[in-house]
């Protein structure tokens, strides 16, 4: 545990540095927005393309793995939704709380940190977890929020959802990488080196951007934020672990990466959704802040445990 904590500390230290920069206004909110945009569209996309293009589809996709991850996610998603309904929240609020409960910071934190700590073998499983988060649950949220507001699901909503997926550079870069891999054409050395050099900026850039963005987050509605952080940091990895190890019997190395990925704090893009649709942004903001701070201890604990599988 101590060894893993020491290995993860540099990653969280960069987040802390970004937080200091944002808090002291050395890095303004506008600067943070542009840094996030740069990382999202360039280094992170390059890293994902490089991973996907150098892996075969068999190294990324596994039906048993996908079912296990989906089962764990759906279990916690439904629990968070039921608790929200019990509290008499609207469908839109229930949907955003359920999103907080299962969508972790896989792109900005999970990909760089878990591949560095757990090794290159972690890349395939992480890409599959990220794909499910982006394609399945982001689409589900869009459907629920529009259904709640219009009372029905129209063809226009489906078109908007489709355009949103196609405009996401993480999805585009992964699909492009997989298509290149499927062609069995070798990645030219200059292109691979270019992607590697650009992708190297993803880790420090993404972590710094996470910290700087946290500086503008508030810690209001602590009771609800605490519950959602508990869902994300404890219930989500626990449910995924049960599904992977006891129900679907996923291969231990892949299960370890899946569980570690599920243990990550609430993703920043959930706040972007909350702001865009004007659904409980302060509640989501507090959940991101609290879960990220607490994850400094919980994530190393989970990684230390799964490495024994």
Image (tube, rainbow, N blue to C red):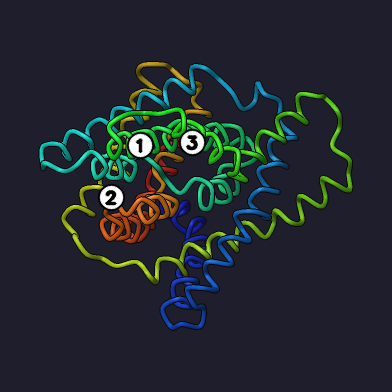
Q: Which of 289 and 142 is in front in this view?
A: 142
Q: Where residue 160 sits in the image (x, y, percent)?
A: 50, 38
Q: Do the residues labelled 3 and 1 touch (CB within 8 Å)?
A: no
Q: Are marks 2 and 3 in contact (CB under 8 Å)?
A: no
Quadrant location of the C terminus in the rendered image: top left
- Name the front one of labels 2 and 3: 3
Neighbor class of circle 3 (other Cα within 10 Å; few <14, some 14-19, many 20+) is: some
Number of numbered discs on residues = 3
Q: Where residue 58 sits in the image (x, y, percent)?
A: 65, 21
Q: Residue 229 carries which label?
A: 2
- Quadrant of the image occupied by residue 176: top right
The CA span between labels 1 and 2 is 12 Å
Q: Which of 13 and 221 is in front in this view?
A: 221
Precedes in sequence: disc 3 or disc 1: 3
Q: Which of 270 and 195 is in front in this view?
A: 270
Can residue 140 be seen in this snapshot?
Answer: yes
Identify the residue under disc 1. Answer: 237
Q: Going 24% across and 41% down the picture, which residue do you hit? A: 94
The CA span between labels 3 and 1 is 28 Å
Precedes in sequence: disc 2 or disc 3: 3
Q: Where residue 37 sits in the image (x, y, percent)?
A: 59, 60
Neighbor class of circle 2 (other Cα within 10 Å; few <14, some 14-19, many 20+) is: many
Precedes in sequence: disc 1 or disc 2: 2
Q: Are marks 1 and 2 in contact (CB under 8 Å)?
A: no
Q: Where residue 157 sits in the image (x, y, percent)?
A: 44, 34
Q: Which mark is residue 161?
A: 3
Q: Going 66% across and 33% down the picture, which residue do you hit? A: 175
């Amino acid at each position: 545990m101590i060894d893993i904590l020491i290995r993860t500390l540099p990653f969280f230290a960069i987040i802390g540095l970004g937080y200091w920069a944002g808090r002291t206004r050395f890095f303004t909110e506008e600067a943070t927005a542009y840094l996030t945009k740069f990382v999202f569209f360039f280094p992170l996309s390059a890293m994902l393309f490089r991973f996907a293009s150098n892996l075969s589809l068999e190294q990324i996709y596994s039906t048993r793995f996908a079912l296990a991850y989906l089962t764990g996610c759906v279990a916690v998603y439904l629990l968070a939704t039921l608790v929200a309904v019990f509290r008499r929240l609207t469908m839109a609020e229930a949907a955003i709380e359920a999103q907080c409960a299962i969508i972790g910071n896989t792109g900005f934190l999970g990909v760089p940190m878990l591949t560095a700590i757990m090794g290159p073998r972690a890349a395939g499983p992480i890409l599959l977890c990220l794909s499910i988060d982006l394609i399945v649950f982001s689409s589900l949220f869009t459907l629920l929020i529009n259904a709640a507001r219009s009372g029905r699901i129209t063809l226009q909503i489906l078109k908007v959802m489709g355009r949103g997926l196609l405009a996401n550079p993480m999805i585009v870069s992964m699909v492009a990488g997989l298509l290149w891999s499927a062609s069995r054409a070798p990645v030219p050395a200059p292109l691979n080196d270019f992607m590697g050099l650009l992708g190297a900026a993803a880790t420090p850039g993404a972590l710094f951007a996470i910290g700087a963005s946290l500086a503008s987050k508030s810690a209001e509605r602590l009771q609800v934020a605490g519950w959602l952080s508990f869902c994300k940091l404890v219930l989500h990895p626990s449910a995924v672990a049960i599904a992977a190890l006891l129900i679907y019997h996923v291969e231990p190395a892949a299960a370890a990466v899946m569980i570690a990925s599920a243990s990550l704090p609430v993703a920043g893009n959930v706040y972007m959704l909350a702001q865009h649709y004007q659904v409980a942004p302060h509640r989501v903001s507090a959940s991101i802040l609290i879960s990220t701070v607490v994850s400094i201890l919980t994530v190393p604990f989970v990684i230390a445990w799964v490495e024994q599988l």
